[in-house]
Image: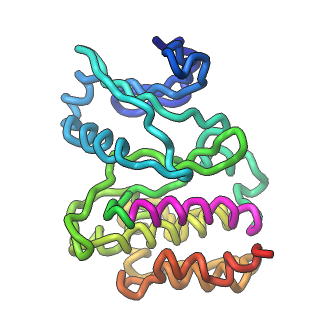
Amino acid sequence: DYELHEVLGRGGFGVVHRAISRCKGSFGQEIAIKMIDKGLMKAAGMTRRVANEVEIHWQLHHPSILELYNYFEDAKCVYLIMEFCKNGELFAYIHKRPHFVLSEPEARGILMQLVRGLQYMHSNNILHRDLKLSNLLLTHTFDLKLADFGLATRLDNRDGEQKTMCGTPNYISPEIVSRHSYGLETDLWSFGCMIVTILTGAPPFQSGAVKSTLDKASRLEYSLPNSISFEARDLIDKLLQLDPKQRISLSQVLQHPFFEIGKP
């Protein structure tokens, strides 16, 4: 029912193709198909993670979240039928730009969409846990789509907490590293790291080794170039707080002067 075209990306146990739907009701629609090899998935001990990814992604419907249209499996693979984003990963898009940065007005438009998507997830008590530039996709109209829910988790209640160690070193929150219990605020730390990356070209705590990156984060050891506006600097400082309870909330983020600047 799907006509496969070029490979869009590869992971540890799967591949994503651009495809054209031949299904009734969506005939001719451009889509992305993620094909997960069951043998590799099982060998990597990832069966539960994939099931979790599908279960959570299937429940999410928001303009800033990549749409999962359908999913099914056969003896060999699990297939996820998803929205196609013509302009690919934000990571690759930024790396085509001079100095690997976006201007603050351009960043503001993209980040605003991400905040809306995170607000929707958090209102449903779902924590993403792996926010990074390669998990943000751009459509043909440069609308942002949050993707990859392999590490996402549902908190049991509003005060729900997790203790699982996971994430990407440059964006992982100190409370996850220290194996303290954590909640929705952990995504806000990662969001702060992403703002720094988008505006400066590098994550705030990046270093040559994972341990030193995590150590720098635990000491809040980062600096911002003079090219960053006062408003951006203030927002970053309010997000990169070691105490999760001291971090600015998503609703406060939207009211912050950094986002107010661009409003008419």
Please provide the residue range marked out in magenta. Answer: 104-122
226 left or right, relative to 27: right
Residue 90 percent location from the top left of the image:
62, 49
Residue 201 percent location from the top left of the image:
65, 61
Residue 69 percent location from the top left of the image:
44, 33
Q: What secondary structure is the magenta-colored segment mainly?
A: helix
- Given residues 37 and 24, the one toward you in this image is 24
- Given residues 20 and 4, the one toward you in this image is 20
21 left or right, relative to 155: right
Quadrant housing residue 80: top left
Q: Residue at x 49, y 79 (%)?
A: 239
- Given residues 180 and 68, the one toward you in this image is 68
Q: Residue at x 61, y 63 (%)?
A: 111
Q: Is residue 90 above or below residue 182?
A: above
179 left or right, relative to 118: left
Q: Residue at x 24, y 76 (%)?
A: 159
